[in-house]
Amino acid sequence: MKIFLICLALGLVWVVLSVVRALCYYFRAKKPPVVIFPEDFGLVKEDIRVPVPGKGEISGWFIANPNSTKTIVLAHGFSMNKGDILRRTHFLAKDYNLCYFDFLGSGESTGRTDVGYSEPGDIEAVMRFIRQTKPASSQKMALYGLSQGAGAAVRYASTQQGVSCVILEAVYFSFKDIARRWIWKRRKTPYFPLVYSYLLFKDIKLHCRLDDLSPKNTAPGVTAPTLLIHGAKDTISPFANAEKVYALLSGPKELWAVAQAGHTSCAKEAAAAYADKINHFLSTYF
């Protein structure tokens, strides 16, 4: 009996540690190193640093196009960085100025992030910095968001009128749902009571409900033309989520399903069609 109790106690300790590790992995964004750079695609970058008082410093790249007065700001997904989104979208440098950045707590940026809450503030800081320091290049501005960045882009665009158009890839509908699916797919951690309890703790700490900040509540405020790109085989944010967000958007909108793509793999699966779709949308609305 004693041996059984010892084994049981060790098993419980292992479960608790596994759960804590899984939750920390999700709610404290990992910082994979930046290994993809503009130079890899023959592009010249300007390193930018955007201070966020009391929170840290955002690291970014500005890729100038001397023939354009338009800038696209691009926001990456969870556990990604500016290099990951550059790999998907570098073709846009042919026609536009581009600004890639790392959310606080990700990539080469300092500070920490409250995932699902603080990212729109990072976008605002970057947008303001570009407008102030590069006015000739940012007479018009567009916003591109991938997964976590897409959710942040929806919330930002729902309250700001200075965005000419928005591109959303792999957008989620409910923060609670994406957290449940992501943590189960990556760490096999059940939503209740573990993730549920942690979300409740975050809501209390932040004095808000993270789920209320999700696209399911913020999408109706987006009046800018919006292109949604979504993998038909996405199991983390199923295609039905994109359909729900699409239905709520208030401005001109288009939804494109990439047949063989999963979560954030549309560029890989669609190849040239991906670039064509985005370029056509931008040439129409930007």
Image: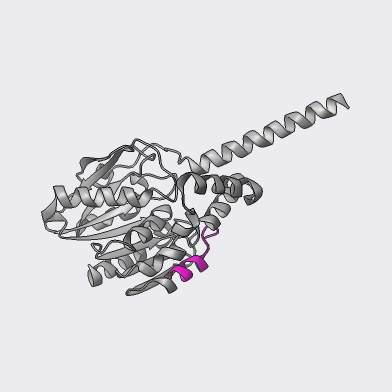
Quadrant of the image occupied by residue 279: bottom left
Q: How many marks?
A: 0
Q: Nearer the viewer, residue 96 or 253?
A: 253
Please give the name of the residue rendered at 27% of the width and 54% of the height, measured from the top-left corner. Answer: 73
Most extreme residue toward the right is 1
Instruction: Look at the image and say whether residue 125 sits in the magenta stretch.
Output: no
Q: Nearer the viewer, residue 170 or 54?
A: 54
Q: Is residue 30 left or right of residue 201?
A: left
Q: Is residue 182 left or right of residue 168?
A: right
Instruction: Look at the image and say whether residue 237 sits in the magenta stretch.
Output: yes
Q: Is residue 205 left or right of residue 136?
A: right
Q: Quadrant of the C terminus?
A: bottom left
Q: Nearer the viewer, residue 205 or 88?
A: 205
Quadrant of the image occupied by residue 15: top right
Residue 99 visible, this orientation: no
Q: What is the x, y in percent for residue 126?
A: 26, 48
Please give the name of the residue rendered at 24% of the width and 44% of the height, measured from the top-left corner. Answer: 61
Q: What is the x, y in percent for residue 1?
A: 89, 27
Per the rendered image, the range of residues in magenta is: 233-245
Q: What is the x, y in percent for residue 248?
A: 42, 72
Please give the name of the residue rendered at 36% of the width and 63% of the height, measured from the top-left corner. Answer: 274
